[in-house]
Amino acid sequence: MDACTLGDLLDAVGGTSVRLHTAPAGLAVPVTEALLHDAHAPLPRVPGALLLAVGVRAAAAGPLVRAVAEAGMTGLVVRGPDGPAAEAETYGVALLSVAEDTAWHQAHLLLASAIGARPVPATGGHGDLFALADAIAAATGGATAVEDPRQRILAYSTVPGQPVDEDRRQGILGLQVPADVENTEQYRMLFAADGPLRLPALGDGALPRLAVAVRAGGETLGSVWVVDDGTLAADAEETLVQGATTAALLLLRARAAQELARHQNSDLLRRVLEGTADAATSAVGLGVEGPVRVAAFVLDAAGLPDAEQTGLRLLDVVRLQCAARYGRHACVLVDGVVYALLPAPGARHRRLAEDIVARAGQSLRVPVRAGLGEVVAGVGEVAGSRADADLVLRVLGPSLPVATIDEVRPRVTLLRLAEVLGAKPELTAGPWRSVLAYDAEHRTDYARTLVCWFDSGCDMGGGGEAAGRASEHVPLPAEASTEAGRDRPGRPRRTPGAVAAVEGAGGTRAWGGYRLSTRACRPAAAAGSGRGRVGRRGCRFSTRAYGPARRPVQHVGVPTDGSYRISTGIPTDSDCRINTRAYRPTATAGSARRHTDQRRLPDQHAGIPAGAAAGSGRGPVGRR
């Protein structure tokens, strides 16, 4: 097999994980292994090795470069970007670096896996297992199969003339051992045994088996099975034990290759999410084409003590669920958020996210939230979908753990607007600051009135909820009238049992220099000096308008029934009066005795321009 070179290593793990600063001897130099530096032991002579500068700051690693060159090593790996590039050029040593937040054991595992997994055939890492299965079959005299712990068939022998049964045929066709209760019991017995085990046939027409577990240390990596038709070699068990040892090495290397491929996919997906990867090559590398969508998953628990480990477990859950639906799939953990690239169509994306959130919450015992970005046309637009998914996560909560961007777009839009306004103070400048300053100085409430006006679609006169909000808890000057005609400066209070004012508004309103006070009375009482009409709820209103000198201008009794409307002309000057008319479908109301029907009910009018009449009567108008 060809040895791994520095160029091969960088192709496997280069990019954001491992960065090359200089390679004076070129990229074709061999890389044999990765070593951890021990400051308390002499540096061994290992030609072709990469030395990881554990315990040495990158800026202070200059003397270590010379020692690496004297030991015949290929290069030095430091943590951080400011390594001794000049010294590396001088001594002809390659200088590489990993991110400052990378743990040394993780960097060592990554480099060692890449170096060891490099010379793997193109058959998915299992090409040598097929050759091993053929060798075991030839030595033992029985058809052989190599399986993983999940009873998936990784390799099988093809030696002609060896007897097989139906279970073997079905297993090879589906690359999966047929599910059976008796099969499960045999696997339990096998993994509990210390050596080879002879197992009886299962059912008519089946043949017995000779099997052995494949282990590395205390971990079970799989098993090797040989069909026993009674003609196996005398040393078949010993041969099988030796074959299991070789299988363990091959399975470990295959696992390293798979981990390396997974790491490469994750690194590629990370660059795609950042928008720094080439779209065409990324689509091929990730195995996706056409429209895609980014799904983001995050732990909904602040201050979790083992957040990093829990995040990795969440990554495993997301990767497993996505792989079950889409096959080989790239997922990546970035800053505590797990991202997955989901291929279109997206009709089932929300259901998948809900399923992942439910499963992850049960297994991790931590609430999980999921946000789905916009469906985009291709890999080149994934960065935008990721930004959408991140915004969705920010507006989610316990009552809404999963959502798509379309479901929460109003909230997301307001969030973005708030961010833009906060980042650019010039966008918030304007006369509204003067309104707030005036309100603070004169104890007025014009700012709140403006907000309610905007809420009502710039139509305060249309009546209804917005008009009512404008009149609730308005601070009044000393001349304001309250419940019993007593002056309570700045503190209007609600009357117990009082009904809201006409068209849903209540309390006291202020227009210009006037105050309009509304009081509710029981049927047996009078309100103010006027007689209000009684509504179906048993209450009536008395409305009195006061000028700056507290002279009552006009008093109108207003019924509380919902069938009444009020038309009011609003004064703008101390010489003006308020002319208020209330119409009832079949009776008179206030000071205007006019019979109308419901088709003639006038709408409420607020803020009548100078010279305009209110209702069907004309009140005097002021200079404004």
Image (cartoon, grey):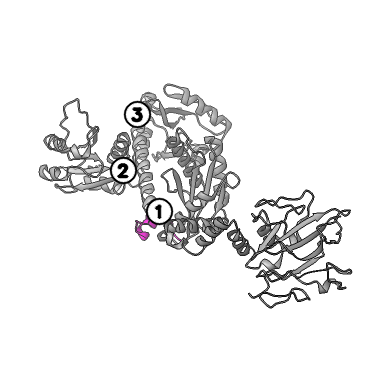
- Secondary element type, mark 1: helix
Residue 480 found in image quarter = bottom right
Per the image, the residue denoted by label 3 is 245
Of 246 and 498, the residue lying toward us = 498
At label 1, which amino acid type do we have? Leu
Q: Which of 57 and 533 is in front in this view?
A: 533
Residue placed at 82% from the left, 57% from the top? 527
> Residue 270, can we see it?
yes
Measured from the top left, where is residue 260 in percent x and y?
A: 34, 43
Q: Give the range drawn in magenta.
A: 274-290
Q: Which of marks 2 and 1 is in front?
A: 1
Task: Choose top left, top right, bottom left or bottom right for residue 594.
Answer: bottom right
Query: Is residue 282 one of those drawn in magenta?
Result: yes
The residue most toward the top is 194
Gap between marks 2 and 3 measured at Cα = 18 Å
| Marks 3 and 1 close (CB-CB < 8 Å) | no
Density class for disc 3 (Cα within 10 Å; few <14, some 14-19, many ≥20) is: some
* Type of amino acid at the residue the image marks with label 2: Val
- Mark 1 surroundings: few (<14), some (14-19) or many (≥20) residues within 10 A: many
Q: What element carries label 2?
A: loop
Which residue position holds label 1?
A: 273
Is residue 278 highlighted in magenta?
yes
In the picture of the structure, the residue carrying the numbered disc 2 is 120
Residue at 46 percent of width and 56 percent of height = 419
Horizontal side of residue 216 vs 301, given as left or right: left
